Image (cartoon, grey):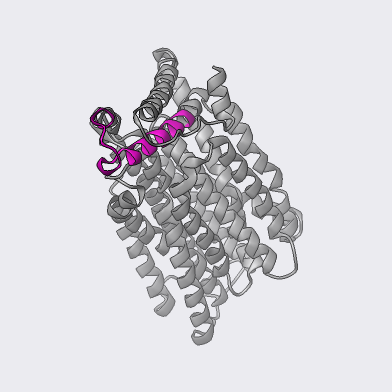
Amino acid sequence: MSTVSSQLNGHEPGLPNLGGDNEARQRQSTAKSLEDQISSVGSKGPPRSEWRHTVWKDMLAFFTLGIIIALPTMVVTSAANSMFSGITGLWGICMSVAAAITTFTTPLFIHHVPYNARVLVCFVASVLSFVACVLGSDVVGPSIGAVLAGFVYAFGTSLYLTVAAFYDQRTVIGFSTGSGFSAVLGPALYIGFMQAFEDKWRHAILVFLPLAFVQPCVWWIMQSSQSCITAEQTRQAARIREAERFANQPAATSSAAILSANSSIHETNGKQGFGPGRTRIGLFWKTIVPQYVVPLLTCTCGAMFVLSGLAPTFQDLNSFLDAPSGALNYQLDFFMYGAAQFLLAGLAIFRAFPIIWFWALAQVFVVAIGITQLFYPFLTYYGVWLIFMFATGGVVGGGVTNTNYKVADDFRKRGEEDDVRAFAMSYGGLGNFAGDVLGGGLAILVQKLAEAHLAARTRGGL
C-alpha cells in the first residue's frame, strides 16, 4: 500500500537502461508488478448491492468537475460584451486558440505527468483566470483572462475525460452534462451579480473566485479513490510497456527470448497498445480527426458563429421588437443558449444519440436560418430569437456530449488497452475548441461587416 501511495504522490519507478536480457526482464517484471496491483485494486470494487450507489456518486463528482472547469469560460462569455465592446468575438478567439492548442498538444506528453500534478495546474490556472480578467483598464487583462479560461477548459476536459476511462462509462455523460450546466449557472449568477453590483462587471467576476477551490476538494475527497489509483498505476505501467516496445524492435536486439516476452506484452487479450507499429500521432490523424474531430468542429463552429457574431450583430442593428436594451440583451441570449446546451447534454444520460454527423448537419441548418435573418429579416420579435438561440445551444450540447460518449464507447467496444482509450478520450474536446476558434474568427468578421454595411433598424425596445 505504501508503494501505491508513493506513486500517487508523483514517485515513479525509474525506467531502466534499454538493452540486454536482464534489463528486459526487469522492465517486464516492473510492468507486471504494476499490472498485478491494478488487478488487485480493481478486484476490490464495491459489492454488487453498492455498485449503483458508487456509479451515481462518481457521476455526481464528474458532473461537479464539469461545472467547475467550464465556469471560467462561461463567466468570460457572459461578460464578453462588456469586456470587449465592439469586438465581442475577440474573447472567442483568445479563449479558443488557447483551448485548441492545449487540446492538441497536451495528450502527446501529458502521460509523463502524474494526475495529482495535473489537477493542481488546472486549479491554479482557474484562480488566475478570474484575477486576470479584472486587471487593467483595456482589453489586455481580459484577453489574458480569456486565454487562461480557455486553457482551464481544455486542459481540464482532457484531464477528466482521460480519468473517466477508468470509471463507469456514464461518468463521461456526467462530466459533459456538468459542462453544459455551467452554461446555465454561469450566466444566471453573473446576471444576478451584475444587478447586485450595479453593472460593475469586474466586481461580478471576482465573486466567482472561491468556486475554483471546489475542484481539488472533489478530486481528493469525493471521487472513488480506487479508480484514481488504477488510473495512476496504468499510466506508469503504460510508460514502461511503451519503452519496452520501442527498445525491442527487431533491429535493436537479437534475443529471441526478449522478442517472445515482448510479444506477450504487445498484445494482451488481443489488444494492441502504443509502440513502433502504432503511434499516438498515427492514431490521431487516421482515426480521431476524421471520425470525431471534424463533425464536432462543424457543430461548434456554427454555434460560436451564432453566439458571438449574429447575436451581438442583431443587438447592434436593433433587429427585434420588445428586445431589452444594453448588456442584458446578450446575457439573455447566452442564458437561453446555455440552458438548451445543458438540457440536451443531460438527455444523453437517459438516451444517447451518438450519430455525430446528425448534430453537425443540424447546426449547419440553424446557421443558414441565422444568415437568412441577417439579410432578409423574417423574425420580428425578440422572444422568437430566444427560441432560435435555444435551438443553437441545444444542438451544440447534444453534439459535444454524444461525441464524447461515442469516443468512449467505440474504443471500449474495440477492446483497446487502457492507455489507448485514455489517449483517445483526451481528444474528445478538440473539435469543440477548434470549432470555437474558427467560429470566433467568422463572428468578428460578420460583426464588422454588418457594422459597415447594414443600417440599424427602428424597432421597439424595453
Dominant SS in magenta: helix
Q: Is residue 168 above or below residue 388?
A: above
Percent position of residue 188, x then y: 61, 50
Quadrant for residue 294, please give it: bottom left
Q: Nearer the viewer, residue 239 or 403?
A: 239
Task: Examine the structure image and report whether residue 198 is included in the region drawn in magenta.
Answer: no
Quadrant for residue 147, please give it: bottom right
Q: Is residue 100 above or below residue 268?
A: below
Q: Nearer the viewer, residue 255 or 298?
A: 255
Task: Examine the structure image and report whether residue 258 is included in the region drawn in magenta.
Answer: yes
Left or right: where does residue 227 sit relative to residue 357? right
Residue 184 seen from this side: no
Percent position of residue 236, x then y: 46, 32
Residue 448 seen from this side: yes
Percent position of residue 426, x then y: 43, 45
Q: In which quadrant is the C terminus drawn?
A: bottom right
Residue pictured at 44% horizontal, 25% vertical: 55
Q: In which quadrant is the N terminus drawn?
A: top right
Q: Is residue 374 above or below residue 226?
A: below
Left or right: where does residue 74 sit relative to residue 362? right
Quadrant for residue 75, please give it: bottom right
Left or right: where does residue 88 sit relative to residue 199? left
Magenta residues, start to end: 232-259
